Image (cartoon, coloured by chain):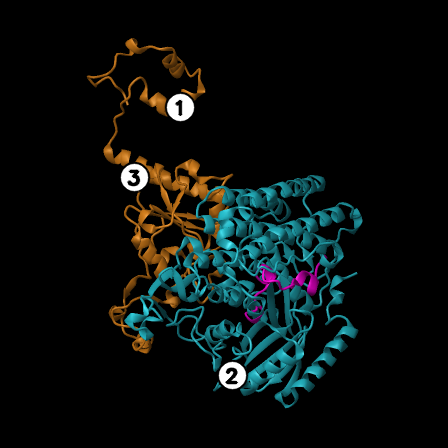
Chain colours: A orange, B cyan
Amino acid sequence: MSSEQKPFVTDDTQVQTETRDARMAGADDRFNSKLREAFGSSPFILTKFDKFMNWVRGSSMFMLQFGIACCSIEMMHTYAIKHDLDRFAAGVPRASPRQADVIIVPGTIVSKFAPRMKRVYDQMPEPKFVVGMGSCTISGGPFQEGYNVIKGAEEVIPVDIHIPGCPPRPEALIYGIAKLQERIANGESSPVTVKPYELEQFGDLERDEIVDKLAAQIDEDDLVMRYNWADSP
Amino acid sequence: MSLEEQQPDDDPAELEAAVSRGDELAELLGDLVIGREEHMNAPGLVVRPDEVQEALFKLRDEAGFDHLSCLTAQEYEDRYESIYHLTSFDDRTDEVSVVVPTSKDNPVSQSAEPVYRTADWHEREAYDLVGIQYEGHPDLRRILLPETWQGHPLGLDYDQERPQIATLREHANPLEKDQRAEQGNTMYVNIGPHHPATHGVLHVETVVDGEQVVDLNPDIGYLHRCEEQMCQQGTYRHQIMPYPDRWDYISAGLLNEWAYARAAEDLADIDVPEYAQIIRTLGAELCRIASHMIALGTFALDVYGDFTAIFMYAMRDREIVQNILEDLTGQRMMFNYFRLGGVVWDLPEPREEFFEKIRDFLDGLPEALEEYHDMITSNEILQARTVGTGVLPPEVAKSYGATGPVARGSGIDYDLRRDDSYGYYDELDWDVVVEDGCDNFSRLLVRMREVEESAKIIQQCVDLLEDWPEDERNIQSNVPRTLKPDEDTEIYRAVEGAKGELGIYIRADGTDKPARFKIRSPCFSNLQTLPEMSEGEYIPDMIASLGSLDIVLGEVDR
């Protein structure tokens, strides 16, 4: 941030103006921001490029417009007036996964939907981040014992931030996103978790009773997701 | 005084009437009836599985049962059973259950689809979850679970631990194979399951020829979270009530809770104090406003296509309602506020402040609605998009079992709050809103006018509650700690949810948990009308029709 080492710095004394004075002294609130202070008299800052990129990434997040269940209603409230997620540089929902950086998973994931969600996640460009919203994305939530319910989003895709609640309030979602921005700005990446449920070709599955049974219905190269419910947490 | 006394099962005179109605219908059907049952809400007529259509045709054409409200399928130790809950759009209290038992080793029953179009999906669901086969059904496939699923999860011997496989395959164009090249080119379009206009995880398999829809098939089940199983695993008293909030999750929580409360209270013969009924009515109507606001906002979003004024305005008004509901229940969305026999706690203190808050909201509402009318209903673009599109004639709507604003937008004067009154509605002064345009615009208008009616109801409830004597504020009647309704009592009760007739069927087996818990979701039936409204129309009109149906996938899939 300091300008002393640099050769081409405008000579401060030459450009003293009233506005400058006010700005430095903080007489006028408009100019009294931290960024201004950091800039000081100089228009230059020095930082590492990757650090800068991380900061940019965290400060301009495009969310995927992705609604699943109850939590998506609170998610809509978070985007809309009063809570207005846009204030935190994360409020532009994109309808296409190819334009999005962050996917908020707002709801229960069931067996029919998990392969589709995995596909949507795969379509997002790197680097991408996942916010698991609500109890269902943590463990299946109130539906954990259901025969059709995936026991948490992490069974299918890696999750950066978990927000508990059923559903979490908009304030909680904003807090979770702020935490995600913090992590991104610090260059932390999500832990890679072992995902039990992957999309794979039917022909690659280990043959057992159920695979034999379905062999007539599914082609060898069809993509499938196999749920071993007995192993679920 | 209990308001529940007006129910047929409580009043001896009415019970007698119900029995004689059963005799009358049994006489009408003659030899078709092989046995009789008594359900708490209606007489039950047992019919042979290969004579279902004949019996249903007779009941529909000669006894006026034009509404197949629900189909419940269940497995007993010794048999399968399908129950057709029939009623009439003209007289909702006239009900009959047609019970069709089938044997364990050959569970085949005749399909009711030729009689009631709505049976199509209901029977597919029964096949999917319970495993009864319907002979003569046009398209008996799984509906909620993946096509490759093994077993029927609500059957008695289902093993939940067994592995399952779901596929991610391309869907095939259903028209391509019987079309020759010169007949024009159809294109297959997947709308959903991840799509901003489908209001959740609905998948619409669409075949278009140019801009026109030639074939359309809603594919559901992407949010099938086993609600019925969850309720069958919970005890009556406390463990079931949190789930209704999550069926229709667009803040219609209290309306849904009421559906369960009504069925269970009638089943276990529990009274609800009058004071609690007024609080319930107040809360439920607030929920209806919140729910209609989001229907309005997202409909405008679908038709205009952006997150601008109307969506934000609707959300603003919803925030106010949610704040009031939060004061009342402690939660913004998943209220869990009703208890069997009343509500969990009294109005928040200081009461004046709470009433003031509601009054402020109601005072501002006419102006807000004026604003909506300026921006939406009197807008030429919206009129061009909605007037005369998505037409649903009343006869078709009835055949598909459409209820709620969808039916009332098609000129069907049917509202359970009036026709099968519960709570405090029959003591209050309000009107059922009916529009006979049958199009997207009418459905929108019905919702907007219903908000006004709800406001009227809330106003009267506030007045009543304000003057209620302090020592008579009884919020809950005495309810046994463990509820064990008598074995083999069956009940089907419905309330007017935000989207239409929300019905619950419960069969008790003498334990503290229901043996069968079936949810009749209004959205499930309403969504079935989508192909009827869209085939042959332009594809943007299909999106508008879908928006005007106002479905919630949590309730469609359950």
Residue closest to the eye, B377 or A32: B377
Image coordinates of residue B55 in percent, x first then y, are 60, 83
Disc 3 target residue: A187
Image coordinates of residue B215 in percent, x first then y, are 40, 67
Q: Which mark sits nearer the N-terminus, 1 or 3?
A: 1
Q: Amino acid at mark 1?
A: Ser
Compared to residue B125, the image places residue A39 above or below, namely above
Q: Chain of mark 1?
A: A
Measured in 3D between alpha carbons, the distance from the residue under mark 1 to the one under mark 3, in whole angstroms, is: 24 Å
Image coordinates of residue B455 in percent, x first then y, are 66, 48
Q: Chain of mark 3?
A: A
Disc 2 target residue: B109
Measured in 3D between alpha carbons, the distance from the residue under mark 2 to the one under mark 1, in whole angstroms, is: 75 Å
Residue span colored magenta: B398-424
- Visible in this render: residue A2? yes
Q: Nearer the viewer, mark 2 or mark 1?
A: 2
Q: Nearer the viewer, mark 3 or mark 2?
A: 2
For the point 21% across and 19% down, which residue is it?
A6
Q: Are marks 3 and 2 on the same chain?
A: no
Measured in 3D between alpha carbons, the distance from the residue under mark 3 to the one under mark 2, in whole angstroms, is: 62 Å
Disc 1 target residue: A33
Residue closest to the eye, A64 or B478: A64
Q: Amino acid at mark 2?
A: Ser
Q: Is residue B143 left or right of residue A43?
A: right
Where the N terminus of chain B falls, by quadrant? bottom right
SS category of the residue bearing label 1: loop
Q: Nearer the viewer, mark 1 or mark 3?
A: 1
Q: Is residue B444 left or right of residue B17?
A: left
For the point 27% across and 72% down, which residue is it?
A219
Q: Chain of mark 2?
A: B
